[in-house]
Amino acid sequence: MQSFIRSTVIAVLLAAGQGRAAPLQPLPDFSLERFNLDPDGLGSLGLGSGLTLPASNYRLSAGLQFERDPLLLSLQGVPAGAAIRNRFTLNLTGAYAVTRWLEVAGQLNVVPSQTGDNLSSVGLQQPGKAAFNEPFVSARAGLLRSADGAPLDLAVQLGLGVPLASGQAFGHDDSPSLVPRVMVSRNVGSVLASLDVGTLLRTNVGLPGGQRIGSQLDGGLALTTDLLQALRVETSLRFVQPFTKVPGGLELLAGVRYRALPRLELFAIGGPGFHDSPGTPAFRAMLGAAYTPALAVRPDAPTATSALSGPVCAPSPAPVCPAPVVKELGPCDPGQKHTPEQCPDLDDDHDGITNAKDECPLEPGPLATRGCPDRDGDGVPDKIDNCPDQPGPASNQGCPVKIKEMVVITANELEIKHKVFFDPGKTRVLPVSFGLLNDVARVMEAHPEMTGVLIEGHTDNTGNAQRNREVSQGRAEAVRDYLIKKGVAPERLQAKGYGPDRPIAPNATAPGRAKNRRVEFRLVGQQAPAGEKLPLPLPNPAKSPSENP
């Protein structure tokens, strides 16, 4: 700006030396305004927060602003006058929440009066005394919400300045301007801290002398708290840093808001500015009011968060919401610990299937396998797939058909399709059962989540009961030893002989006694808890009734 003034004055002096009158030059017009009301007002008055209005709510606000010395001119460090000494601006804003996360807004500034020094001595025209500034529209999207359990509130906004304005009063740019912004906020005790940073992207204005006014980085930090139910105070530090060779500026503002009526809020804000950046005044102050009807909020839209704690009627002034009501949190509220059974309507593994319909509520999986993982994509959930990394039909327990499966994984046991055979009256496993036990070892290797398997030995009631218990214990230990030799970790296996104590069929008949002479593989430590659904139904042939020789 100094180079521009210097060039202008030199031109005037040269013209005077040649005996000719130089015509007055107009100052290039550009948008000078650096402060606007935040449309939804959920954070501070002039800076956005990460919050958005509840769905179907809206806010209208108007403020009359005064700026002292927002545009000073100097030449070689010597003040040459104020292009604008005193400026009044009427800020009109409105915001409407389309959904709980999408908010649209509009803004219009009107300059009813501005005055400045007579600049004809340096060859410059006076700017206009009144004008309508360019309208501004924006859309804000809430990405994170602390009310939903996020660590902070986060919103992004994209604004558009439309170059429709009247008068040469530093109220508009020559072409449309874009204003992307990022806003975050977080409650720290009783204070809501908000950070608003954005970029004004616009066409540069060339000034005589080589300087250019154009795009810039701006924003600020605001701290807001509620002193009383209807009284809110704030302080904010705002900055602007042009991308061109024009000085930056800072402003320190303090504000107060008072909910005078249920739907009416009165506010005031003001403070000093520092440095001589165009648009940064020596002092600014604004008085205004905001109107927010108490519209119905959709049931799924959480109430806006107060700077103090919990839900209040921000944006509606009290007494629509007389006092914050502390709601006792339940296990299904965001951030609370719970089991899937406690919260059937939630989706704890985020796979699109609610806990009530998800057979693996803590592990994401497709709908085809009822929410359970299926690594090989064969339609058989991993937890009951004998070959979870090799696709195969459900009729063969998820294994390729060339591998004839003899083990079925259920909720509580590894069910075998054939019996384990031993020497008559002894504990040695016969080779005819090696293939079956090899399958058991392979299935346990494919499912490391099976942390414990209890090998149970059972007999019929023929002979001495105590002797039968000893034989059944020895046979269970022989099966355990075989599985350990096949690579199963010893700590995953237990052996227990029950003898004739747990029959599954009457001992009065030979077929019944044959069924009672058996080995079972019971899953321990991972049985299905109460209320958990059984795995997907798969063919489950009855156990062979063949007897041990």
Image: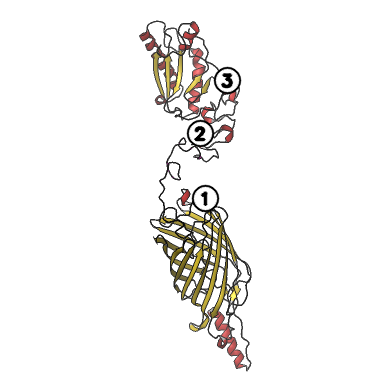
Residue 245 shows in this picture: no
Of labels 3 and 1, earlier in sequence is: 1
Q: SS at mark 3?
A: loop
Q: Which mark is residue 195?
A: none
Between residue 92 and residue 10, name the one nearer to us: 92
Q: Mark 1 points at which residue?
A: 301
**Which residues make up the magenta segment?**
322-347
Q: Mark 3 points at which residue?
A: 404
**Position above or below: 387 against 225:** above
Amino acid under label 2? Cys
**Position above or below: 399 against 325:** above
Instruction: Please state the horizontal and vertical placement of residue 403, each as a whole percent of the image.
Output: 58, 22
Mark 3 closeness class: few <14, some 14–19, many ≥20 residues within 10 Å: few
Q: Give the dominant element type of the magenta stretch: helix, strand or loop.
A: loop
Cα gap from disc 1 to disc 2, whole angstroms? 29 Å
Q: Residue at 41% across / 63% down in the picture?
A: 231
Amino acid under label 1? Ala
Cα gap from disc 2 to disc 3, whole angstroms? 27 Å
Q: SS at mark 1?
A: loop
Q: Residue at 43% across / 9% down in the picture?
A: 460
**Horizontal arrangement in the rendering, residue 437 relative to residue 539 (left or right):** left
Depth check, mark 3 against mark 1: the one in front is: 1
Q: Name the residue under label 2.
A: 360
Instruction: Please state the horizontal and vertical placement of residue 238, each as a whole percent of the image.
Output: 47, 67
Between residue 549 and residue 111, name the one nearer to us: 111
Say if mark 1 contacts mark 2, CB within 8 Å.
no
Of labels 2 and 3, earlier in sequence is: 2
Instruction: Please state the horizontal and vertical placement of residue 318, each as a whole percent of the image.
Output: 45, 59
Instruction: Please state the horizontal and vertical placement of residue 413, each as a whole percent of the image.
Output: 47, 23
